[in-house]
Image: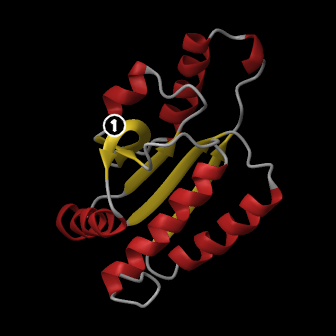
Amino acid sequence: MRIRTLSIGKTNIDFINVGLTEYNKRISRYIKYEWEELPDVKNAARLPKSELKKEEGKLILKRITPGERIILLDEGGKKHTSKSFAKWLEDGVNIQAKDLCFVIGGAYGFSDEVYLKAETKISISAMTFNHQIIRLIFTEQLYRAFTIIRGEPYHHE
């Protein structure tokens, strides 16, 4: 089994890249893990929001592997605590034993086509974050989930 995270656009903030590198390495101790940045849509600033979401959706759908469980990071998704996310992840790994693909979309969310392919949506917070910083927050939470599952001391109660 493996877990992948897809995100739209390059991460161009240095401290986020440093954090992603560190947490991606840590997650890889627990499971086969991959992070993939999809290219920005060309001329994105000139496109209407609906067209931009469609073009980003095409990029996302091209990278989905048959049989993967697609989980969107979306403000309308299920809210978890760190512990409930760890339980959800553990159940997904142990019970369903299918590859997981978490998807972080662009600034305006996902196209209808991507929503239709998704198994579920997860909300990281009720607050709004920059789409680059959410990458680091999510990756840290994914790492934290594995430490909770293993009973390691990273997560304090």
Q: Does residue 82 appear to the left or right of 13 in the view shown? A: left
Towards the viewer: 79 or 92:
79
Q: Which residue is mark 1?
A: 118
How many discs mark residues in the rendered view? 1
**x and y percentages locating residue 116 in the rendered image:** 32, 27
Tell me the quadrant of the picture where the C terminus can be found. bottom left
Locate residue 100: give its quadrant. bottom left
Towards the viewer: 101 or 150:
150
Tell me the quadrant of the picture where the N terminus can be found. bottom left
Locate residue 147: give its quadrant. bottom left
Q: Residue at x 66, y 64 (%)?
A: 20
Q: Residue at x 53, y 35 (%)?
A: 60
Q: Residue furthest left?
A: 95
Amino acid type for the residue under numbered disc 1? Ala
Q: Does residue 107 appear to the left or right of 14 in the view shown? A: left
**x and y percentages locating residue 119 in the rendered image:** 28, 41
Towards the viewer: 62 or 22:
22
Circle 1: element type = loop
Q: Residue at x 42, y 51 (%)?
A: 101
Towards the viewer: 157 or 146:
157
Q: Residue at x 48, y 32 (%)?
A: 61
Question: Label 1: few (<14), some or many (≥20) within 10 Å?
Answer: some
**x and y percentages locating residue 14 in the rendered image:** 82, 59
Color encoding of the figure? secondary structure
Q: Is residue 60 above or below residue 44?
A: below
